[in-house]
Image: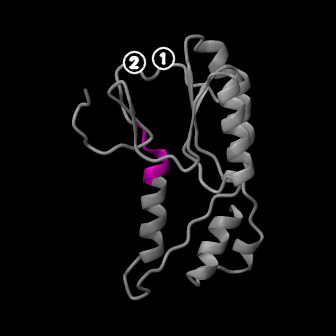
Amino acid sequence: GTDLNKDLADNLKLSNADVKNLTPNDFFIAALVDEEEDNAYENIINKVDELLNFKKEEPGSEDEYKPKTLKSAIKHMKDANLAIISLPGEYAADEARRALKNGLNVMLFSDNVSMEDEIELKKFARDKGLLVMGPDCGTAIIDHVPLCFANVVRKGD
């Protein structure tokens, strides 16, 4: 229910009073359906449930620690030198600043970060000998590892 998503739903004529009252912590789905299609709404709900409850089986994934906060990630991943920030723009700069203060380079995947915040973050990073990629950072591959999303590219020299 971020303002950006509510505006998008409104512009697409997929909004109502319930959508307007959502908060950024609320999850909503807006969809156009063919009302003549049998079970159209139920099919959408079932598909969303399936996607939300899907668990990818990976070797060792049950035991792998998945930090929920930057603080816990730093505590458990002492050798980390990069934080990937992907939050709504209004929250992204604060989290990026927190990562930089902890000595981490930042890939800021978020968009809608103000120009003032971007300049301040990049100056702060420069002064600490760190790097800020982004905001609205797209394709990134570091040491052959794609981050967030990446295109297929030739190996560089």
In the picture of the structure, the residue carrying the numbered disc 1 is 63
Q: Dot 1 surroundings within 10 Å: few (below 14), some, or many (20 or more)?
A: few
Q: Residue at x 73, y 30 (%)?
A: 98
| Picture coordinates of residue 124, whole percent (x, y) | 72, 31
The quadrant of the picture occupied by the C terminus is top left
Coloring scheme of the render? one colour
Q: Residue at x 61, y 25 (%)?
A: 130
Q: Residue at x 45, y 67 (%)?
A: 44
Q: In the rendered structure, which segment of residues is drawn in magenta?
A: 50-55
Query: Could you say which is closer to the camera, residue 90 or residue 43?
Result: 90
Inspect the magenta stretch and tell me whether residue 21 lies in it: no
Query: Could you say which is closer to the camera, residue 120 or residue 96?
Result: 120
Q: Do labels 1 and 2 touch, CB within 8 Å? A: yes
Q: Dot 2 surroundings within 10 Å: few (below 14), some, or many (20 or more)?
A: few
On residue 157, the disc is: none
Task: Give the residue type that dot 1 points to.
Answer: Asp
In the picture of the structure, the residue carrying the numbered disc 2 is 60
Whether residue 108 is visible here, answered yes or no, is: yes
Q: Quadrant of residue 95?
A: top right
| Picture coordinates of residue 78, whole percent (x, y) | 60, 11
Query: Could you say which is closer to the camera, residue 36 or residue 61?
Result: 61
| Picture coordinates of residue 36, whole percent (x, y) | 39, 88
The quadrant of the picture occupied by the N terminus is bottom right
Q: Quadrant of residue 66?
A: top right
Query: Circle 2 sits in a helix, a strand or a loop, which is it?
Result: loop
Q: Residue at x 67, y 52 (%)?
A: 113
Task: Give the residue type that dot 2 points to.
Answer: Gly
Q: Is residue 51 above or below residue 36?
A: above
Majority secondary structure of magenta residues: helix
